[in-house]
Amino acid sequence: MKTCKDCYHYVFVGDGKNGKGEATKVGNCFRYPPGLTAEGSAYPIVGCNERQCGEFLPKTAGIKKRLR
Ligand code: SF4
């Protein structure tokens, strides 16, 4: 199954936790602009092996698909 780590928008960050509190590798999702947080703004943190969302774009996608 493809997950966030296979997505063009994903950039690895390091160790973190998933929604169940289990240790996993995490990264940022750069699909959309950063959101506001108490400290300022940040891109969403996503677990690299969890799932994919509806905005998933394969890293191997051609430039035409990236510019859609
Ligand atoms: S949340 Fe969606 S768009 Fe973001 S890295 Fe994961 S699959 Fe890609």
Image (spheres, helix red, strand yellow):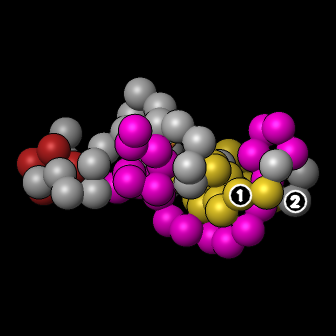
Residue drawn at (78%, 38%) of the image? 19
* Label 1 residue SS: strand
What residue lies at 75% left-to-right and 46% top-to-bottom?
18
Quadrant of the rendering where the N terminus is positioned: top left
State the image quarter where residue 43 is shown. Answer: bottom right
Question: For disc 1, does the CB lie below 8 Å from ligand 1?
Answer: no
Instruction: Looking at this view, name the residue that lies furthest to the top.
Output: 54
> In terms of image quadrants, where is residue 2?
top left
Estimate the x, y position of residue 21 in percent, counting from the top left. 86, 45
Of 65 and 58, which appears nearest the observer? Answer: 58
In the picture, measured across the screen, residue 34 lies left or right of residue 5, that is right
Q: Amino acid at mark 2?
A: Glu
Q: Is residue 13 visible?
A: yes
**Segment colored magenta:** 1-21
Q: Nearer the viewer, residue 42 or 52?
A: 52
Q: Which residue is mark 2?
A: 39
Q: Is the residue marked by circle 2 packed among few (<14), some (14-19), or many (20+) residues within 10 Å?
A: few
Image position of 55 with respect to 12: above or below: above
Can I make out residue 43 in this image? no
Residue 24 badge: 1
- Residue at the far bottom: name it: 14
Residue 7 in the magenta stretch? The answer is yes
Q: Is 36 or 63 nearer to us in this picture?
A: 63
- Residue kind at label 1, given as amino acid type: Thr
What residue do we see at 41% from left, 27% from top? 54
Is residue 34 rendered to the left or right of residue 17?
left
The image shows residue 62 at horizontal and vertical percentages of: 11, 54
49 magenta-colored: no
Q: Is residue 25 above or below residue 44?
A: below
Q: Nearer the viewer, mark 1 or mark 2?
A: 1
Dot 2 lies on which element? loop
